[in-house]
Structure formats: structure tokens, C-alpha cells
Amino acid sequence: QQQVKQSPQSLIVQKGGISIINCAYENTAFDYFPWYQQFPGKGPALLIAIRPDVSEKKEGRFTISFNKSAKQFSLHIMDSQPGDSATYFCAAASAGGTSYGKLTFGQGTILTVHP
Amino acid sequence: KAGVTQTPRYLIKTRGQQVTLSCSPISGHRSVSWYQQTPGQGLQFLFEYFSETQRNKGNFPGRFSGRQFSNSRSEMNVSTLELGDSALYLCASSRSSGPSYEQYFGPGTRLTVT
């Protein structure tokens, strides 16, 4: 059962453009939503994360928008650069119980930023 | 502060063998989670350890096991390897256990089963 659906699978953006990746979740118990960036041959690196008590969080060129009623969240990369070319994963987690330490990941988006 | 380290980085094993992978968390982190990453299934949660106790386990067969030591270092073991076990195995550490604690990933161990 895929609990976090991510789209698009791949994305091509010109340098300086805005990259937008979307995720939707089903489990209403999720209350932590991180985004990870992964380069080939590396482990995923935490980019930014949000809790449901806020609708938006910005860190540098990266912004998470969160819509609790729609059970959707998205990553916006402003002024996209060729160095941003990587695979991006959204994830979700819930507190306690049988969910300790478990991140449920989306399928990933391969982002290519052309110079 | 040093990041999460995993050894070995690459491993080639034969079907039917067993393998042990090691993970050293960031200093001060007490929780270690393990994930399997494959092109087809993506990133899937294997299990999580906190204070030497397995707190959570994903939907993997019993051939996959793990443990955590008193210094928070963790190992995972896969017995009777199958071709489908070929994957990147990632461990992630966090300060404590729970979703408010960020998980930081290591570079992974690339396991190839022939």
C-alpha cells in the first residue's frame, strides 16, 4: 500500500526557473513531512521538513507548502540551478506507537536543471 | 560533527550466503533506522532501534534482522541471500525516537547478490 504518492516522476527545468514537486498522503496520523535530496552514489540528505501546524516553511531557495485538508504537500525550488539536479523524495511519519523511526517515502522525482 | 558512517560501502555475495552490514550513527544520536532502496520499490523501512531495543519493524521476511549496541552502533544481517536482496541499504540516525527528530542518512552499502 503506497501511502505517499509523489509526482512527477521526472522534471526538467531551465536554470533560474521554479521546480515544483507534489506529494499526497493517505494516513491522517502523519504529522511530520520531510523532503530529502539524493545525488547518485550518496545517501538521501535532509533538505527541509514541516509539521501540520504551519502551511508553509521556507529555507533559502526551498519552500514547503502544506495543505492539511487536501492531505497534500509540495516542494518549491526557486531559482533552480544545475547543481540542484538530483532525485528528490518526500516522506511522512507519525508519532509513536508502531511508527517509531519509520519514514514512509514517495517514489522520488528526478530533477534535471538545464544550464 | 562526523556524519553517519556505513561499512562496507560495496559488497558482492552469492545467493544463499549471509551478510552483515554496519552503521555508526552521528555522535549523540541514539536511534538508528535501516532502509532498503531499490529502483522498483524505492525506499522501504526495515527496522528501527533505540537504546538497544527494536522499536519498529517493516514488512520484510525474518531473514532480515538487526541489533544495536550500547554505543548506539547498529548492525543488520541478511541470511540466505536471494537475488532480490540486491539493493542499497541505508541507515539513518536521529537524536531520539519519534517523528520530530530529523533522520540523517549514511552513504549506504551497495549489496549485489549473484
Image (cartoon, coloured by chain):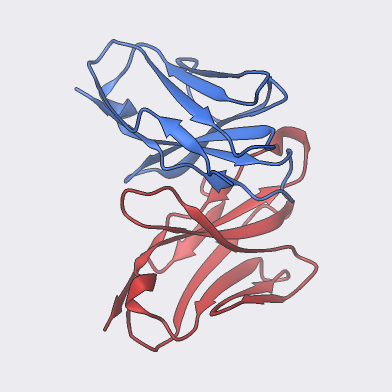
Chain colours: A red, B blue
Please count the marks in the image.
0
Q: Position of residue A24 (x, y in %)?
A: 57, 64
Q: Nearer the viewer, residue B52 or B15?
A: B52
Q: Position of residue B90 (x, y in %)?
A: 45, 38
Place residue B88 in its image quadrant.
top left
Q: Residue at x 55, y 55 (%)?
A: A4
Position of residue B100 relative to residue B45, above or below, is: below
For residue B26, what is the image quadrant? Answer: top right
Could you say which is closer to the camera, residue B24 or residue A19?
A: B24
Above or below B42: residue B68: above
Which residue is rendered at x = 69% and y = 33% of the image? B30
Tell me residue A51's x, y (percent): 74, 63
Location of residue B44 with respect to A28 vertically, above or below: above
Residue that lies at the very extreme toward the bottom in this rendered image: A16
Q: Residue B73, relative to residue A32: is it above or below? A: above
Q: Does residue A35 appear to the left or right of B54 in the view shown?
A: left
Q: Is residue A26 visible?
A: yes
Q: Who's the residue at 47% across and 42% down the image?
A: B106
Q: Given the current orientation, which residue lies at the most extreme front position?
A: B1
| Viewer-nearest residue: B56 or B76 | B76
> What residue is shown at x 40% (from left), y 41% (from top)?
B37
Position of the C terminus of chain B, as image quadrant, is top left
Residue that sits furthest to the right in the current view: A53
Q: Is residue A110 visible?
A: no
* Rendering coords of residue A102 (x, y %): 62, 40
